[in-house]
Amino acid sequence: MCWQSFPQTETFRRQLILSLKSEIEMIKSFQIEATAAALLIGLTGLAQAAGDDAATFEIAPGVYSYTSGNHYHSMFVVTDDGVAAFETVNSKHSIAMLEAIRAVTDQPVKFALQTHNHWDHASGGGVMQEAGAKTVMHKLAAEWLEANPGDADLVRTDPLFVQRCTHETVRLQPSSPVAMRWALEDVELKSGLSIPEGAKVVIDLESVNRDQSIFGADAADFNPHRETPDGVPAYGLSFGSGMHACIGMDLAAGLLFHDDSTMDDHIFGLVPEAVQALFDHDPVPDPDDPARMDDSTTRPYFGHYPVLLRS
Ligand code: HEM
């Protein structure tokens, strides 16, 4: 019997996954050291260095404006006593800004100044601290951040949030940038476009998964709190669709959380469970061995991301 003749109902998929649950348990006992780097490489949405639109401008002698290609702008000032960076944004942005700083000076980054208390402006502070910088912010902003730990806390305490982070990463970074299909008969799409029998259709997954009319104005950003319209999975088309959709989807990324799901019986998926196991050990980037991008691909993946496990 070929796979395609199996009934792919949710009940069937749930039973299949439960029978594979022991595999998921196994991942928890993996040597965490061995998996840590690989998992963080996968989570490029959580930490990913500069894209093609990154830019550094010297706006005055020793004073630089910097963007990693998102809509955030930072600056850094190079002095004989070290570098001061302003506006750390998020980990992805700060890792890229550190690369930009290293491209213009060998001076250490001594200070990272936070402009205000929003996590989307402040969460890159940890990267700067690991690089040796002291973070500086208004006393009230520091108090607010401590009282409202936000996503940094959620990755340790909320497995559903970790699952959403995984789905968001898979949406932004599909394993292949395109999917292909061949039309077995003439097809007319809802848009009125006609596809003749035999035509090859190439689906640009990166564009589809960042379609603002579906995923919102911030479709190109990593936002695990995103709500998607009914019928649109948070991971977009990254697992394909139809008869040949990925059979490992539920195993890798878990099931969607429904109204009748409970935290006890929910299938979170192998990747979220492994990532959660990693966060349970309180990882931080190794300050003596900085992350490096994978230079064998143009995709924004880490090739080397050592972490220290603190518990
Ligand atoms: C995050 C992890 C994974 C991603 C992003 C992924 C992605 C994909 C994609 C995009 C396809 C093509 C779907 C299509 O053409 O419509 C696919 C097919 C497939 N995947 Fe995965 N996959 C993942 C994990 C897995 C795992 C864990 C397994 C096995 C346990 C698996 C087994 C398969 C198989 C057998 C197919 C071919 C299905 C068919 O042609 O009928 N995948 N996967």
Image (cartoon, rainbow, N blue to C red):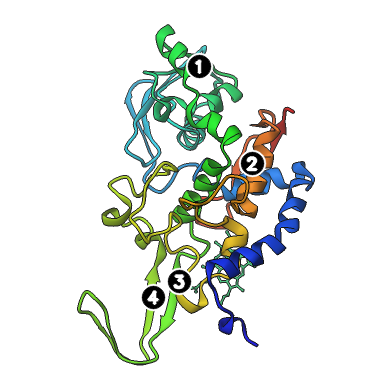
User: Is residue 83 visible in the rendered structure shown here?
Assistant: no
Q: Check residue 146 in the rendering and tell me which mark sits there, or answer none.
A: 1
Query: Which of the 4 quarters of the picture holds residue 255?
Result: bottom right
| Residue found 24% across the figure and 76% down from its top | 190
Distance from disc 3 to disc 4, alpha carbons, whole Å, reads: 13 Å
* Above or below: residue 184 compared with residue 125: below
* Badge 2 residue CB within 8 Å of ligand 1: no
Proximity of marks 4 and 2: CB atoms separated by less than 8 Å: no
Q: x and y percent of residue 299 in the render?
A: 50, 55
Q: x and y percent of residue 276 in the render?
A: 64, 41
First in sequence: mark 4 vs mark 1: 1
Proximity of marks 1 and 3: CB atoms separated by less than 8 Å: no
Depth check: give the residue in front, 140 or 72.
140
Quarter, ligand 1: bottom right
Q: Check residue 276 in the rendering and tell me which mark sits there, or answer none.
A: 2
Distance from disc 1 to disc 2, alpha carbons, whole Å, reads: 22 Å
| Amino acid type for the residue under numbered disc 4 | Val
Q: Which residue is mark 3?
A: 241
Q: How many marks?
A: 4
Give the secondary structure at mark 1: helix
Depth check: give the residue in front, 49 or 269.
269
First in sequence: mark 2 vs mark 3: 3
Distance from disc 4 to disc 1, alpha carbons, whole Å, reads: 48 Å
Proximity of marks 4 and 1: CB atoms separated by less than 8 Å: no
Give the secondary structure at mark 2: helix
First in sequence: mark 3 vs mark 4: 4
Left-right relation of 218 to 44: left
Distance from disc 1 to disc 3, alpha carbons, whole Å, reads: 43 Å
